[in-house]
Amino acid sequence: FDYSHIKKVMDYCINADPDGFFIPRIPLYSHNLTWWEKYFPEDITTYEDGTKSVVSISSDVWFSQSIEALNNGIDYINSIEKYSKRIVGYHLTCGNTGEWFYYNYREKGIDYSESNRKGFTEWLKKKYIQIENLNKDWGKTFQDFNDVCIPKIPCNLSGINTNRVILKKGNDD
């Protein structure tokens, strides 16, 4: 990882306020997907219409690589005392506007990528324990958790979150 840009930003901030303390905003994503999609095609946000966007935040590979990059970046900052003594915290960002929403959520809907489907399946297993419990709640006859797809949720350009209506049961989880 190349963290040389951190030095430039930190030096700029220190020059602007020699007595200042800082909370760096750290984006955990990249818009450069050429290499990512080549090696991790199942980990790209995929919309209902089949179009693709950025790295899926449900990707285990993305998560582990983000943690590694974050730890290395923090280690870099901590290795330089004039920077480390001025850090009071870190603001981690990802997703649309760095607020952890899926990109294009309002326009394109949710992520139907394979990595998100796998994450959804794992969440269902933890929540329902047995497929019979899910079938009872959902009024379905799935044979296995892997048979369950992420429900199709209408895209709503008005800004009203239709997820609350469609997936109301389980909002507490």
Image (cartoon, rainbow, N blue to C red):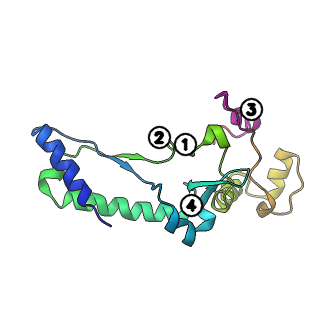
Callouts 3 and 1 close, C-beta under 8 Å: no
Q: Of label 4 and label 3, which has the lower sequence position?
A: 4
State the image quarter where residue 125 is shown.
bottom right
Assign the magenta stretch its main secondary structure: loop
Q: Which residues are magenta?
A: 155-170
Mark number for residue 97?
2
Q: If the image is split into quadrants, where does the N terminus sit?
A: bottom left
* Residue at 56% over, 71% down: 38
| Label 1 element class | loop
How far is the residue under mark 3 from the one under mark 1? Answer: 18 Å
Q: Position of residue 150 (x, y in %)?
A: 74, 52
Q: Amino acid at mark 3?
A: Val
Q: Nearer the viewer, residue 72 or 17?
A: 17
| Label 4 element class | loop
Q: Amino acid at mark 2?
A: Thr
Q: Of label 1 and label 4, which has the lower sequence position?
A: 4
Callouts 2 and 3 close, C-beta under 8 Å: no
Of marks 4 and 3, the one in the foreground: 4
| Label 2 element class | loop
How far is the residue under mark 2 from the one under mark 4? Answer: 19 Å
How far is the residue under mark 1 from the one under mark 2? Answer: 8 Å
* Residue at 42% over, 54% down: 28
* Residue at 50% over, 68% down: 35
Density class for disc 4 (Cα within 10 Å; few <14, some 14-19, many ≥20) is many
